[in-house]
Amino acid sequence: MKITFLIPPVLNHKERPAERTAGCTTMVYPMVNIYELTVAAILEKEGYTVSYEDFISTRRNVKKLKAFLQKDDSTIYIFWSVNLSMRDDMEVSRMIHEYSPEAYLIYLGPAPTFYVKEFLQYRQQIVVRGEPDVTIRELCRCLATGTDFKELKGISFLNDDSTIKNNPSRELLKDLDSLPFPARHFINREHFSNPKLKRTPYTSMVTSRNCPFKCVFCVPSSLTFARELDAKSQTGRKPFISMRSVENVVEEIDLLASEGYKAIGFMDDNFIITEKRLRPIADALKKHGIIWGCQARADAIDESIARILGESGCHYVDLGVESFDDEILKYIKKDLTRVQIIDAIELLNKYKIPVKLNILIGTSPLETKNTIKETLDTAIKLKADQVMINIVAPFPGTEFYGVAKENGWIVNGDYVPTDVQHHSILSYPNLTSKEMEHLLYWHNLRFFTRPAFIFSQLRRFSSFSEFCRAFKALKNKLTTEKTI
C-alpha cells in the first residue's frame, strides 16, 4: 500500500503558504513539520511504501501538482491541516477525488479536529482527531487489510447515509519514547533553516507535548493544539503533559550529530521544565557543538538555568511576553508579572543568550496605543535581540474566542482564518482592527530598522547565504498581503 503525505502549493500565488508546524501564521521561513514526519516514520515502520510530497519547500506550482496527481497511484493521501491551509487542502482534495476517486484522504492536525464537518464531503475522507500517532497506525492497518475501521477510536467519517460519525476520542500517549524518531530522510534539509540560529544543516526537535498553563488566547503548536481541542471536547479540560525521557532525547541528539546537523530548534511549548532535565540535554548538545534554541516561560529562568543555557551553546530563548502591563497579563491569565519577565530577560542577557520576545497586540480590551508602545519601548530598553509582534486572533476552541464572540469584538461576527502577522479580525471600542494593523506594521518597522538591531545581526552571519535567508524572513514579516 502506497501512502503519500501531501503539502500542496498555495493555489493563489499572491498569498503565502500556511505555516503548518506552529499552525497560526503564514510562513516567515520554512519550518520542518516534525509532527508529520513522526507519523511518516510510524507508517514506514509498518512496512508501507511512504512518499512525502512537499510542494512548498521544493517550489513546485499547481500545474506540477496536477501532473503529479494524474500519474500517482497512492492508496492514501494524508494532509496535516491548519486553519490557514484549510481552503487549499479542501480544493486539492477535490482534485484527488476527481483523479483517484477510490483513494482515501486522511486529515490530521487542529483544523480537521475542530472543523470536522468541513473536511468530510466524500465517503473516502477520514478525520483523525487530536493526537494522531496510534490512531493513524491502526487506521492504515485496517485500510491495508480491508478490515472495518468504523469502530476505531479517534476518527470521524461519513456513514452510509452521509451523516457524520464522531467516534470516541483515543487515550493520549504517555510514553513518547515508544514513538520512532521523525523520518527526516523524506525532506531535503537544505530547504530548511532558522534565522535565529544562522547555521545549517538545521532541524527541529520536540521533547514534550502540551503546557499546563491557561492563557486565554493560547494556540500552542499545531500538534498540541489538536491534542488540546479534542481533549477539551471530551472533558472540558486541558490534557496532561507527556514527556520523552532524557535518555531518549539524548539518543536523538546523538543521531542528528552523526548525520551532520549543526543546529536544533526545540519546538516544545515549554522546553525548560526543571534543571535536572535540562542539564543532560544541554550537555549532549554542547558535546557535539550543536547550537540550539528553545521556547520557555519567563518564570522558568533562574541564575542556574541561565548559566546552563549560556555554557551549552543556546543561541536563543523565545519568551512569550505578550505585554509588559500587569493588568493585561492578569486579564489573559498569563500567570506572570512584569517584574518576572524583566528579571528573566536580564538573566539571559547576563549570560549572553539572545532573547526573542513574542508580543501580542489586542489580547484584551485593556489594550491601548500607549500600552502597546510601552511594551515595545521596554523590549528595546531591555535589549531584546528580536521581537515577534502579532495581533491576537480569537481561535475557536480557546477561552478568548468565547469571550470575544459574546462581546461582539470579532469583525463580521465570527472567526475566519487570518494571518496574525499582518491582519486583525478583532475590534475593541477603544482600539479598532485597522488601528491594530497600523500599530503592528509601524512597531515592527521601528524595531527591525534600528541601527543597533541591524549591526548586531550582521555580526552573526557566517555566510552570504545565511544573510539572504534572514533578509527574506524579515521581508516576509514586514510585507503585508490580503487576508486569507
Image (spheres, grey):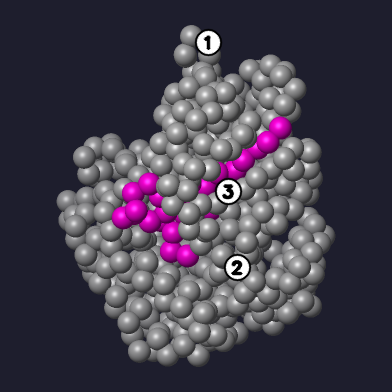
Residue 176 placement (x, y as % from top left)? 74, 47
Mark 2 residue type: Glu
Q: Marks 1 and 3, how far apart in space? A: 31 Å
Q: Is residue 423 left or right of residue 378?
A: left
Viewer-side label of 2, 1: 2
Pointer 1: residues within 10 angstroms few (<14), some, or many (20+)? few
Q: In the image, is residue 288 part of the stretch drawn in magenta? A: no
Query: Magenta segment range?
Result: 1-29
Please tell me the numbered disc located at residue 160.
1
Q: Secondary structure at mark 1?
A: loop
Please tell me the numbered disc located at residue 190.
2
Mark 3 residue type: Glu
Q: Secondary structure at mark 2?
A: helix
User: Which numbered disc, 2 or 1, marks the residue that appears first in the sequence?
Assistant: 1
Viewer-side label of 1, 3: 3
Quadrant, the N terminus:
top right
Name the residue nearer the viewer: 442 or 380: 442
Q: Does residue 332 show up?
A: yes
Q: Is residue 144 left or right of residue 131?
A: right
Please tell me the numbered disc located at residue 53.
3
